[in-house]
Image (cartoon, helix red, strand yellow):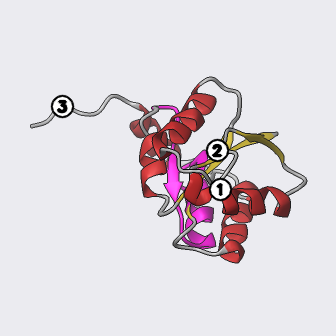
Amino acid sequence: MQIAIASDHAGFELKEKLKKAFEYVDWLDLGTHSADSVDYPAFGFAMGKAITDGRVQKGVVICGSGIGISIAVNRFPAARAALCTNATMARLSRQHNDANVLALGSRIIGIEVARECVSAFLDTPFDGARHQRRIDMLSAVAPAQT
């Protein structure tokens, strides 16, 4: 299975290290391709589009905090990006939330924690069952405000 990966300039170095650490993964690199300053929304949008178009089933995005790029990805209804700072969060994001994009903050976590997060994210299946109802709710139109 091909996995997309994207980052802004702040996440570029961590993105490259993760690609090397997980050489067995068929990475679709959506950019950026240098540490030159860029805008994180463009790369979050590229990930959201790749998920929406079905080019990939899963992805990893990285910016300085992980917050901005995860917000950009989650603008796409098909995407469920989870910002994780440890392997337990990454595992639970898959088990309970069927997250299809892992968001990481390069200024928040180091390479070892990032590796643990990616490993847990890639290796953990969705539990389904009672959690599927909630995933279906996330995919529905937002309820009217009362």
Q: Is residue 142 left or right of residue 18?
A: left
Quadrant of image for the C terminus:
top left
Alpha carbon separation for disc pair 3 and 1 = 40 Å
Mark before the other along the chain sequence, 2 or 1: 1
SS of the residue under disc 2: loop
Question: Furthest-left residue in view?
Answer: 146
Badge 3 is on which residue? 144
The amino acid pointed to by label 1 is Phe
Q: Which mark identifies residue 32?
A: 2
Which mark lies nearer to you, 3 or 2? 2
SS of the residue under disc 1: helix
Q: Are marks 3 and 2 in contact (CB under 8 Å)?
A: no
The answer to which quarter of the image holds residue 59 is: top right
Q: Please state the total of marks drawn on the protein image.
A: 3
SS of the residue under disc 3: loop
Which mark lies nearer to you, 3 or 1? 1
Residue under the image location 70 percent in, 34 percent down: 56
Q: Residue 88 colored magenta? A: yes
Decide which of 69, 84 is in the foreground and name it: 69
The amino acid pointed to by label 3 is Ala
Q: Is residue 103 visible?
A: no
Q: Residue 98 colored magenta? A: yes
The span shown in magenta is 77-104
Residue under the image location 83 percent in, 64 percent down: 21
Q: Is residue 111 left or right of residue 140?
A: right
Badge 1 is on which residue? 12
The answer to which quarter of the image holds residue 94 is: bottom right
Quadrant of image for the N terminus:
top right
Q: Is residue 75 visible?
A: yes
Q: Position of residue 125 (x, y in %)?
A: 70, 53
